[in-house]
Amino acid sequence: ALGLLDDPQCVEDIRFADIDKLTKASGNGGGGGGGAMKKQLSYVANGDRIRDNEATFVEEYRKGGLPKNQVAELAPRAAHSCTGLALWPRLMLPGSDDAEEYVINSRGHPDGGQRRSHWQTVLPIMGPEPAADIRGGDRIEVTCEFEAPVGVTKAPRYSVVADVYASG
């Protein structure tokens, strides 16, 4: 199960009609990629979400047939931890004079709830162990970098770095 600690934020905004703007902004002169973007995000762990996540984990672990003592140990640990940054697409198609904007959410928005979708949720892992003992009010600072390749034969590169700061 995936439990969000805060509301989702936009990590990468791609406007396919303006794809060359990324390249031009990077100084590569346009024509098919080669640009880079960097974005800073700040999340604050929400105590209500942590509580709700724990209840969800209890339910999921019970469905999985775990013994009660393991459920009682694992659900709070999972709810008070941060493994990585969940990324999923949200397609927004602009409207026209006679039509409103059309939005396709591959997960619930803004709660991140599961939906039937062929688009996968990507979870870059922050470290070898989840950040533990996350409490309401703790701050998670994230730096995301995206490098668009020159040409279509090379894959884009992503980098996600996060730090957790305890409140109080």
Image (spheres, grey):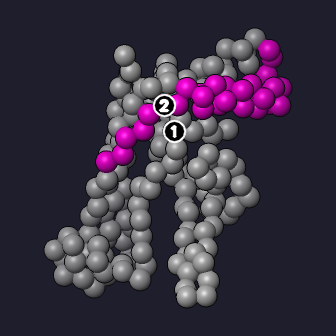
State the residue lying farthest toward the top.
69
Report the magenta residues as a range.
40-68
State the residue lying farthest toward the left.
27
Q: Local crowd at mark 1 within 10 Å, few (<14), some, or many (≥20)? A: many
Q: Secondary structure at mark 1?
A: loop
- Please indicate whether residue 91 sits to the left or right of residue 35 in the image: right
What residue is pinned by disc 2?
45
Asked if the magenta segment contains residue 57, the reply would be yes
- Please indicate whether residue 80 sits to the left or right of residue 125 in the image: right
- Identify the residue at image location x=63%, y=60%: 106
**Residue type indicated by callout 1:** Asp
Spatial distance from mark 2 to mark 1, Cα to Cα? Answer: 6 Å
Q: Earlier in the sequence, mark 2 or mark 1?
A: 1
Marks 2/1 in contact by CB < 8 Å: the verdict is yes
- Identify the residue at image location x=56%, y=63%: 90
- Identify the residue at image location x=51%, y=39%: 6
Q: Quadrant of residue 76?
A: top right
Q: Quadrant of residue 167?
A: top left
Q: Is residue 67 above or below residue 105?
A: above
What residue is pinned by disc 1?
6
Q: Local crowd at mark 2 within 10 Å, few (<14), some, or many (≥20)? A: many
Look at the image and tell me in which quarter the C terminus lies.
Answer: top left
> Where is residue 138 shown, x and y percent of the image?
42, 26
- Please indicate whether residue 23 sits to the left or right of residue 129 in the image: left
Asked if the magenta segment contains residue 147, the reply would be no
**Residue 39 visible, this angle:** yes
Q: Which mark is residue 92?
A: none
**Residue type indicated by callout 2:** Ala
> Where is residue 48 shown, x and y percent of the image?
60, 28
> Where is residue 80 shown, x and y percent of the image?
55, 23
Residue 114 vs residue 119, the one in the foreground: 114
